[in-house]
């Protein structure tokens, strides 16, 4: 290579370095100034549910810390897909945040035939806000005393034993599918349109058992209207410390929790992702917020964006396998 060509190569390389440095400097400056305008927090479900209540609690505290308005925007539809997709397609500038869940980022991508976003590529994971265990419930008239009784009854009469859930493709439904796959118990799923009618029919004896979130089940358990046989999480629930896990009850490897989390669009500067993570961790450590999250059944452990990304990857693989092996179909 002659000296002229070498000079041109050095000039091009230098220009590229200047451009790269300039882009980095602009990103750093944007992060330093963030947020300089209101931030929209999209909740992909209707008002009043766990996701909405959690989002409003976090937003109220976070806007004090950031000295900027946080607007909660409920964008419900298609099991969370519409709201999640709106954030996936938003500008990656830190001003549109998603309250994502196990549904939007672990179940729907494998369950639904057409999801307009890629859960593992179109979002920047910010923080896992907490997990909510499900619980295996039986009605007051059930003869079962243990999880082993359930398995034995299901194997003795394959397909006769039914279980209720809040709906097709929910974490409650898929808890039952995982139970079936890990135990060989042939259960028949009875989907309901929400948790309230499902647990009502378990209490009334129309369906012998169900999988339900601890949040929904706890008042009925305390009232003696249903009995908790086991929780689905790997560890016992703080809200039901005397109830064993399914793993402890003879179903090794069982670990299911619903979860809530925050995401930004892919391409958002890392400095903004890290800043939001740090601020939310401070908010979650406040005694009032901790109490509110515990009341919602959320078990929170501080985590970094990288740790959350690894968790999401494992969850996506887990539910893709359960949906495929269980031949689970959407409504």
Image (cartoon, grey):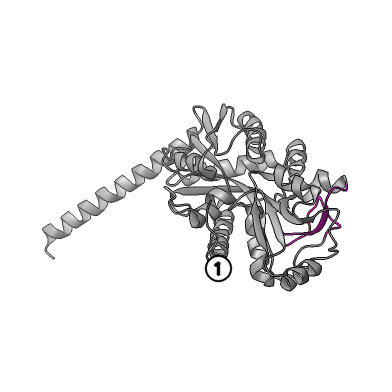
- What segment is highlighted magenta in the picture? 224-243
Q: Which residue is mark 1?
A: 325
Quadrant where the N terminus sits is bottom left
**Residue 106 position in % (x across, y down):** 55, 55
**Residue 121 position in % (x across, y down):** 44, 53
Q: Residue at x 11, y 57 (%)?
A: 4
- Comparing 298 with 268, the one in front is 298
Q: Classify mark 1: residues with Cα within 10 Å, few (<14), some (14-19) or many (20+).
A: few
- Comparing 166 with 234, the one in front is 166
Q: Is residue 176 left or right of residue 35?
A: right
- Comparing 315 with 200, the one in front is 200
Q: Residue at x 71, y 47 (%)?
A: 198
Q: Residue at x 75, y 67 (%)?
A: 247
- Comparing 152 with 262, the one in front is 152
Based on the displayed image, in which of its 4 quarters is residue 73 positioned?
A: top right
Q: How many numbered dots are placed on residues in this image?
A: 1
Q: Is residue 132 left or right of residue 277?
A: right
Q: Is residue 88 visible?
A: yes
Q: Residue at x 67, y 40 (%)?
A: 50
**Residue 265 position in % (x across, y down):** 46, 43
Q: Is residue 250 visible?
A: no
- The overriding secondary structure of the stretch rendered in magenta is loop
**Magenta stretch: includes residue 230:** yes
Q: Secondary structure at mark 1?
A: helix
**Residue 169 position in % (x across, y down):** 58, 53
**Magenta stretch: includes residue 148:** no
Position of residue 319 relative to residue 218, above or below, is: below
């Amino acid at each position: 290579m002659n000296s002229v060509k070498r000079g041109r190569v050095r000039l091009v390389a230098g220009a590229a370095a200047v451009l790269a440095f300039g882009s980095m400097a602009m990103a750093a400056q944007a992060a330093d100034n963030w947020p300089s305008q209101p931030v929209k927090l999209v909740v992909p479900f209707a008002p009043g549910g766990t996701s909405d209540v959690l989002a409003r609690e976090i937003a109220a505290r976070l806007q004090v810390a950031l000295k900027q308005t946080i607007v909660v925007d409920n964008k419900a539809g298609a099991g969370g897909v519409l709201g999640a997709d709106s954030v996936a397609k938003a500008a990656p500038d830190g001003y549109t945040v998603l309250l994502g869940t196990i549904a939007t980022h672990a179940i729907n991508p494998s369950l639904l035939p057409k999801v307009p976003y890629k859960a593992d590529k179109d979002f920047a994971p910010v923080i896992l806000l907490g997990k909510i265990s499900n619980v295996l419930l039986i009605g007051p008239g059930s003869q079962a005393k243990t999880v082993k009784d359930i398995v034995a009854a299901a194997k003795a009469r394959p397909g006769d034993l039914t279980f209720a859930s809040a709906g097709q493709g929910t974490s409650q439904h898929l808890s039952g599918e995982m139970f079936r796959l890990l135990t060989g118990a042939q259960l028949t799923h009875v989907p309901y349109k929400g948790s309230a009618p499902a647990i009502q029919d378990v209490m009334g004896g129309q369906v012998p058992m169900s999988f339900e979130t601890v949040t929904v089940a706890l008042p009925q358990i305390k009232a003696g209207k249903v009995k908790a046989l086991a929780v689905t999480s790997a560890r016992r629930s703080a809200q039901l410390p005397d109830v064993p896990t399914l793993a402890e009850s003879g179903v090794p490897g069982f670990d299911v929790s619903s979860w809530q989390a925050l995401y930004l669009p892919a391409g958002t500067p890392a400095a903004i992702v890290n800043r939001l993570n740090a601020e939310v961790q401070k908010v979650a450590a406040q005694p009032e917020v901790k109490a509110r999250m515990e009341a919602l059944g959320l078990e929170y452990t501080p985590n970094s964006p990288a740790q959350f990304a690894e968790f999401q990857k494992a969850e996506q693989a887990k539910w893709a396998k359960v949906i495929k092996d269980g031949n689970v179909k959407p409504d």
